[in-house]
């Protein structure tokens, strides 16, 4: 939600958000380092082997790290349109 407020209207589509380098650098990190590490591990696992279960593990770990309510997780789930791309290819 932080990024949605910061970068609203920057994507090519109405609901899209364009993420820039400065946006990523300014992203507030969760205070619980262990929870953040678990979310990062879950993200890496998702990028290696994308799928519903891996995505759900990542969403759950990220929600825990940020203490996000289910509504935020549901929003991210709805925004997910397919497997993660590693940039290789």
Image (cartoon, helix red, strand yellow):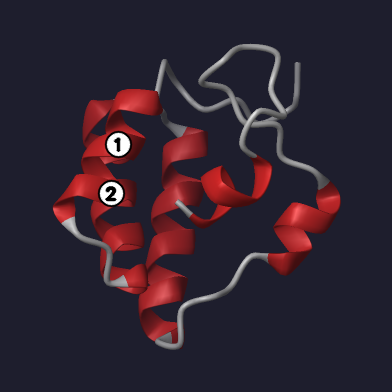
| Percent x, y of residue 27 | 64, 65
> Is 62 left or right of 4, judged from the image as shown?
left
- Point out the residue furthest to the top here: 13
In the picture provided, is 25 more to the left or to the right than 70? right
* Residue ID at (30%, 48%): 59
Q: Is residue 57 visible?
A: no
Residues at discs 1 and 2 in contact (Cβ within 8 Å): yes
Q: Which residue is mark 2?
A: 72
| Residue 38: quarter of image | bottom left
Q: Can residue 10 be seen in this snapshot? A: yes
Above/below status of 1 relative to 49 = below
Asked which secondary structure carries label 2, the reply is: helix
**The C terminus: image quadrant:** top right
Residue furthest left as drawn: 70
Q: Position of residue 1 (x, y in %)?
A: 45, 51
The image quarter containing residue 63 is bottom left
Q: Position of residue 19 (x, y in %)?
A: 71, 40
| Residue under the point 52% across and 57% down | 2
Question: Who is closer to the viewer here, 32 or 18?
Answer: 18
Residue closest to the far right: 21
* Residue 75 badge: 1
Q: Residues within 10 Å of mark 1 (few under 14, many from 20)?
A: few
Q: Does 10 appear above or below 26?
A: above
Between 26 and 42, the one nearer to me in the picture: 26
Classify residue 23 by image quadrant. bottom right
- Crowd tier of the residue under label 2, counting other residues whose Cα lies within 10 Å: few below 14, some 14–19, many 20 or above: some
């Amino acid at each position: 939600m932080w990024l949605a407020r910061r970068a609203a209207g920057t994507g090519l589509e109405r609901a899209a958000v364009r993420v820039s380098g400065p946006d990523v650098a300014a992203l507030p990190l969760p205070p619980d380092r262990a929870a953040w590490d678990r979310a990062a591990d879950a993200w890496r696992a998702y990028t290696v082997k994308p799928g519903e279960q891996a995505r759900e593990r990542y969403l759950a770990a990220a929600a825990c790290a940020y203490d996000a309510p289910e509504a935020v997780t549901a929003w991210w789930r709805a925004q997910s349109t397919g497997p993660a791309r590693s940039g290789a290819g």
